[in-house]
Amino acid sequence: MKIAILTSGILPVPAVQGGAVENLIDFYLEYNDRHRLHDITVYSVWHPEAERHPALKSEANHYEFIRVDSLMAKVAKRLYKWLQRDGYYFYTIEYFIDQAVKRLTAQKYDLILIENRPGYALKLTGRTDAKLAYHLHNGKLDTTVKAYQAIYDAATRIITVSDYITNCVRSINPHDRKTVTVYNGISLEGFNPNLKSHIKRTDVGLSDDDFVMLLSGRITPEKGIAELLTALNQLKDYPRIKLLIVGDVFYGIKATWDPFLDKVKELAETVKDRVVTTGFVSYDQIPSYLQMADVAVIPSIWDDPFPTTVLEAQAMGKPIIATRRGGIPEEVSEDNAILLDTDEHFVGNLAAAVLHLYQHPEKRSKMAAASIARSKMFDKDTYARNFFKVLENA
């Protein structure tokens, strides 16, 4: 098949700036390059490193880059801000998709795959004979979103990352047969507990006898960082329990004032000697930081569709403490994870779960082994193979 892929309009593909969705696109493109399954053209925002990436040498995958940072683009986006206030997405994304559609509709494709922006379909309906497919990571499609019926009807295939998202789509049509779950994958070579790490605990201010919890990701309310810091404060009688935050630091996340950041700073101050932050860490360094941890904590207080942080911790052989939200229960088992409800007892139960694993190293060992065993389900090649199998039946 000749396939066009419409990316998010925010981060580039190849994933030179990171991004969970963008990394997953890279995985199936790598698989397509090796197996020469389809002729694929990717429409992505431009980035200088993306334009020089080795992936562009592929004979099966092709890349069309759209400049969204040029002077002309900046002027155009300002016009979009004022003239397209009723756009489906933020005006910068609307600018990207309009530019992409102009190029795309000048070509002939068998199928157009929309990555995580189902609203793009409204721009394509009536302008192409190609079939439309969506790949939903967290791009919402249920009866609460604008134009949900038109968007749903336009697709011949909807691929989701979890049964949680699949069930959201099926709120539109309980008899739906076009929506299929394909679980995300990761590189089990890159996330391997036997890898040699060049980063030590002492490099980040931790000692070998510390009990280290690791939280990876952005500092946002839905990620549960405030609840985790509160739980850590309840464990003040156990000073060896430390928290390593891998990702954005507390300060400078946004240029504008954010009351949530003030709350996080205040909570962090109460446990400041027991919290270590790394700031931004490149994706290839994540395994080294995971190796430092005794346990991974994913305290999401929203319906996280299928966070790759869970898969990464699992592959590195870490016991997991997470929440019973979204697609998280589909990623783990009772053998390798403690799942908590985000009810009024959440913070206390979170502190109790951390303390339980701190006090029971034998349980941590069993959970670690179970994590490694379960991680085999989520190899990136298995993900790509299943993904194309479903897409080919669109």
Image: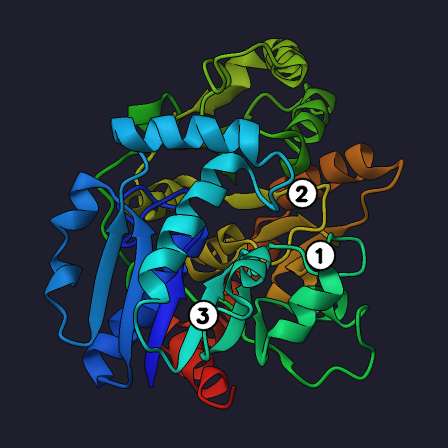
Q: In this rendering, would 35 be left or right of 294?
A: left
User: Identity of the amino acid at label 3?
Assistant: Leu
Mark 3 Cα-neighbour bin, 10 Å: few <14, some 14–19, many ≥20? many
Front residue of this view, candidates 306 and 272: 306
Mark 1 Cα-neighbour bin, 10 Å: few <14, some 14–19, many ≥20? some
Indicate which disc residue 113 carries. Answer: 3
Residue at image position (74%, 53%) is 145
User: Identity of the amino acid at label 2?
Assistant: Ser
What residue is disc 2 on? Answer: 300
Camera-nearest label, 3 or 2: 3
* Residue 87 lies in quadrant: top right
Spatial CA distance of label 3 from label 1 is: 24 Å
Give the x, y percent position of residue 301.
73, 41
Tell me if label 1 and label 2 are in contact, CB under 8 Å. yes
Q: In this rendering, would 1 be left or right of 250?
A: left
Question: Can residue 213 be spotted in the picture?
Answer: no
Indicate which disc residue 326 carries. Answer: 1
* Residue 370 lies in quadrant: bottom right
Give the x, y percent position of residue 260.
66, 18
- Residue 88, relative to residue 203: is it above or below? below
User: Identity of the amino acid at label 1?
Assistant: Gly
